[in-house]
Image (spheres, helix red, strand yellow):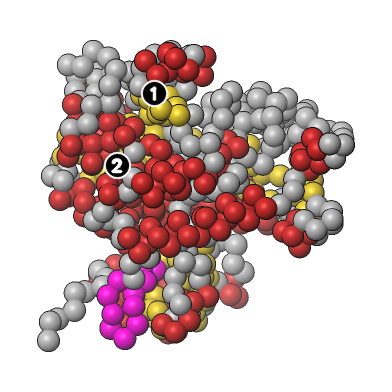
Amino acid sequence: MKARQKRTDTRLAQEVLEKIKRERIRYIDLQFVDVPGYLQHITIPSHWFDLDCFEEGFGKLDGSSIKGFKPIYESDMILVPAPETFAVLPWSPAEQRTARILTNIYESYGGARFERDSRYLAQKAEDAVRKAGFTVSYWGPELEFFVFDKVELFPSALAARDAWAESGYRIESKEAIWSKGGINFPIRFKEGYYPAPPEDTFQEYRSEVCSILEDYFDVKIDAHHHEVATAGQAEIDMKYAPLLKMADAVVSYKHVVKMVAHLKGMIATFMPKPIFGDNASGMHVHQSLWKGTKNAFYDPEDEYAELSQIGRYYIGGLIEHSLSLAAIVAPTTNSYKRLVPGYEAPVYAAWSRSNRSANVRVPVYFRGGKTGHDAKRVEFRPPDPACNPYLAFAAQLSAGLDGIKRKLDPGDPVDENIYLLSPERRRQLGIKELPGSLAEALNELESDHTYLNGIFTSDLLETFIEIKRVESKQQSLRPTPYEFYLYLDI
């Protein structure tokens, strides 16, 4: 009988057991995400943890109750803790001291890794990096989000879902331009970028989130600031990290952002476009490939952007597959209310070195030397924070590696405001427009997905598309307030 491959690092597992004892941890949250990317958990008393549990796992998961996982007739699944993700939850009371550990999901009865486990895709993506001849890929997503004082669905959440006869929402924010008054200065539409306190009322909130991420979750922070929109839009930038570690960090980031807001009586949301007429929340993703200590995207002889030929081929892959990638990196119906002209969101598949109207950008803050070498990367701008980071990073990597493998030339860079170009000029430049809806993006994914082979299975893709088709259709069935405004007197 073939020996089973070890499921965990024994040294790391032992360190976690020592931390559990030293920190007097009473409970462990076993966490994972479903196919769309929502965080799930089950809590286990810490006395059940020993070295064996990091190999055998916990038979506590009913996969039929998790979106996109299992049918009811084969629902038993195993959660195997990933010790490198151990983090004490600072909001847990001392008498119920709790830590979290992200998990890898396995089939039951000695089975293999579960193919729809998002974290497994990220691990396979890192394998693909090495198979392609590189050492590591680094990732630096810029997640934006809103923090509101209150969001009310009225007359109830049920009415908002079913929209029989009455439905609406109300956003309350002390910063908002529509605020009814108070002691705060309102932030006007599209004027929220970098204002200092007292206009920026979330300085301390963001700093607290950053401190928790650094002190408890081993997530290094580069900077934080208010974002462009009114009503508490924020951005916290994490220092770049390898693909799997960064995807784990995004899961932690979103959890901490929401929890800190909740504990302060507010609500944080990563919904891409909650406010009409102002900027939405994106997740621009910076990425690079390295061979040892050498940045494979850097070429000091390139006058335009110090970008290597490998970097150009990688961009060629992102542009070639931009339309189908949209379904994975911008995976909600609300995402396509963000991907419209006029709000710094990318609408067209093109590349440039500083042009934020292109969907692929090569930042050029530094030139030459070690700083230029280390900072050289590609920024893919269509993603938003509603995506599943494991799937989104794996898909972008797949597209980029396909570009390198096939030597896809991205064409000439476009150093013009693409929003202002005529349709004829865009056609001359070969610039394609990104999908205008989730339904269109899913059509593109169904017709262009072979570049994902080897990381994504057909089973996972079919499941993802099925889930998102339902969301798209259900959203299209319901009347909206704007339709009443347009058509009530028709």
Closest to the camera, between mark 2 and mark 1, is 1
Q: Identify the disc placed on residue 431.
A: 1
Dot 1 lies on which element?
Answer: loop
Compare residues 149 and 26 and report the one nearer the observer: 149
Q: Residue at x 45, y 56 (%)?
A: 465
Residue 436 pos. (x, y %): 53, 36
Q: Are marks 2 and 1 in contact (CB under 8 Å)?
A: no
- Kindly identify the amino acid type of the residue bearing the numbered disc 2: Ala
Residue 151 pos. (x, y %): 75, 49
- Residue beneath label 2, please? 399
Over which residues does the magenta segment extend? 103-113
Q: Residue at x 63, y 37 (%)?
A: 233
Q: Is residue 202 visible?
A: no
Residue 442 pos. (x, y %): 46, 48
Alpha carbon of mark 2 to alpha carbon of mark 1: how far?
18 Å
Dividing the picture into quadrants, the one containing residue 406 is top left
Question: In the rendered view, would you say 197 is above or below 304?
Answer: below
256 magenta-colored:
no
Q: Earlier in the sequence, mark 2 or mark 1?
A: 2
Residue 474 pos. (x, y %): 63, 56
- Kindly identify the amino acid type of the residue bearing the numbered disc 1: Ile
Compare residues 275 and 83 and report the one nearer the observer: 275
Mark 2 neighbour density, 10 Å: few (under 14) some (14–19) many (20 or more): many
Q: Identify the disc placed on residue 23.
A: none
The number of numbered badges drawn on the structure is 2
Question: In the rendered view, would you say 133 is above or below 194?
Answer: below
Quarter of the picture holding the C terminus: top right
Compare residues 24 and 379 and report the one nearer the observer: 379
Quarter of the picture holding the N terminus: bottom left
Q: Is residue 267 visible?
A: yes
